[in-house]
Amino acid sequence: MKIFTKKAKFTYIWTSLLTLFVCMLFLDGYPTLRSEGENYFHVYLNGVQVGVVGKPETAERMLLQARRELAGQSDDIVFMDADLRLEGEEILWGELDEEDVIRARMSEILSQSVRETMQRAYSLKVNEYMVNLGSISDVRELLQLAIDKYATEEGFVVELAQDSDREFSALTADVIRRESVSQNSEASRMSAGVERVMSAIHVETAPEEKDFADFETGLKSMYFSEKVEIAEVYLPEDRISSLETAAEDVIKEQETVGEYKIVSGDTLSEIAIKVNIPLDKIVELNSDKLENENSLIRVGDKLIITVPEPELSVERTEDNYYEEAYDLDIIYIDNNDWYTNQSVVHQQPSAGFRKAIARVHYVNDKEVSREILKEEVVLEAVPKIVERGTKIPPTYIKPISGGRLSSGFGARSAPTKGASTYHKGVDWAVPTGTAVYASCGGTVSKAGWGSGYGYVVYIDHEDGRQTRYGHLSKVLVKAGQKVKQGDRIALSGSTGISTGPHLHFEILINGSQVNPLKYLN
């Protein structure tokens, strides 16, 4: 009996083990016993446990499926966080989660981690400027608006083509005539063939003079000044501009820094008119060169100016007919013996009248060149002829150091009996014996007593002017003596008709006194 019981227990244990082994082999949800290592993996997505699988590849496959399902819900590109982590162990048996359950949990976690949806857009680049638009039709319309701003007639359209200079897929933009878009290519080939035949039978003929009626005026060509690049991109919605906003940025004129080169005859006020910028703005932009609107400017110097230009510039060529009165440039005859403040007009100008056909080249609204194709002068213009000096004229300095301006130039009440009521110079009150200097270099023409002047010195200068120094206490030069600017010529005093110690100073031009203060440096 004991032997039977032992056999029964042994049979029961053996049968149980065999049954368990069969279950591990054939029942779903239990991994097969393996001896090579980890066979039971806990799956975590973005730090959250989503289930258990028997192989790492299974988790990776289910994550890929979940991502595809989530991305398929939108036509745009979707960015999401997907940090997959597996923790493996080796076990004899264990229950695995169903794949549909794991995939559903993955989808839920991924949907919570979506960062932003990327939309298809088109990036338009001009130099350093870039704008993003939502469709290629918006790009084409924006570029069309840019040329329509300057087109005086319809007939030019924007064409987008593959950019052969770019390694990656990109487009560039050209401006072409509308009729060439629909031009039949076969007709073009036939025309080209005829041209080749005709060129082979070329006969030299003299060019025929064209009449005004033979010219077809109007817009001839248009193109963008800068290279336009267009590329397909994927961007967040908030980085894509509307057509209206892009047009405002691309077509509207922006303030850009430019230069103006000073030419002969320019003044600051004339430059302000030429460049259409207020004079005070020009002074402000060039504060390192200009103190105020009266500052000296030199030919060849460059001034900074602000030039209104759009981000995308359009160049065009037009053939225009016009009639106009015209003037010829002034003809200058240089005289090296004269000073630059000396000139004589030998011939007065007279305007002419002409008809013309001109080919004009514009950048945006600015004319940059003009070529006369045909011209007919109805009335010849007469140029102005001017002889002018080339020598730099001498300068004049204050003839005394310090002093108080006690009497200006012009009408006044006679300060003392015998004095003039029209003052022909200026007076500086100084102590008797103060040094008096030559205001400009020249030749002393008078040195001595001068009636109402008292002791006086006259100096003749190379530019034809004369200076006079009166009421001196002592004269230090003599007639015929050469003096340089700044040489000491006398001592101040109160001789002649005078009310007290001072220096009386005059400048004469063509024999007449002028206000000296206007000529002193």
Image (cartoon, rainbow, N blue to C red):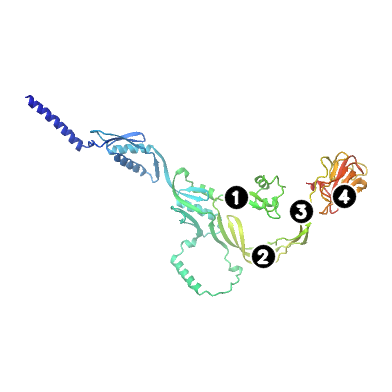
Label 2 neighbourhood size at 10 Å, few (<14), some (14-19), many (20+)? some
Question: Which three-letter amino acid code belongs to the residue tagged 2?
Answer: Arg
- Estimate the spatial distance between the alpha carbons at disc 1 and disc 3, rounded to whole Å: 39 Å
Specify the label residue 458 is tagged with.
Answer: 4
- Estimate the spatial distance between the alpha carbons at disc 4 and disc 2, rounded to whole Å: 56 Å
Outermost residue toward the top in this view: 2
Mark 1 or 4, which is nearer the eye? 4
Q: Earlier in the sequence, mark 1 or mark 4?
A: 1
Mark 2 or 1, which is nearer the eye? 1
| Residue drawn at point x = 14 percent, y = 31 percent | 14
- Contact between labelled residues 4 and 3, with CB atoms less than 8 Å apart: no
* Helix, strand or loop at mark 1: strand
- Picture coordinates of residue 386 (x, y %)? 76, 60
Q: Earlier in the sequence, mark 2 or mark 1?
A: 1
Specify the label residue 308 is tagged with.
Answer: 1
Question: Which three-letter amino acid code belongs to the residue tagged 3?
Answer: Ile
Which quadrant of the figure has residue 62? top left
User: Is residue 3 positioned above or below 151 on the image?
Assistant: above
Question: Which three-letter amino acid code belongs to the residue tagged 4?
Answer: Tyr
- Picture coordinates of residue 295 (x, y %)? 71, 47
- Contact between labelled residues 1 and 2, with CB atoms less than 8 Å apart: no
Label 1 neighbourhood size at 10 Å, few (<14), some (14-19), many (20+)? few
Q: Earlier in the sequence, mark 4 or mark 2?
A: 2
Nearest to the observer: residue 368 or residue 432: 432
Specify the label residue 194 is tagged with.
Answer: none
> Is residue 412 something one can see in this rendering?
no
Q: Name the residue beneath numbered marker 3.
A: 392
- Picture coordinates of residue 317 (x, y %)? 57, 60
Question: Which three-letter amino acid code belongs to the residue tagged 1?
Answer: Pro
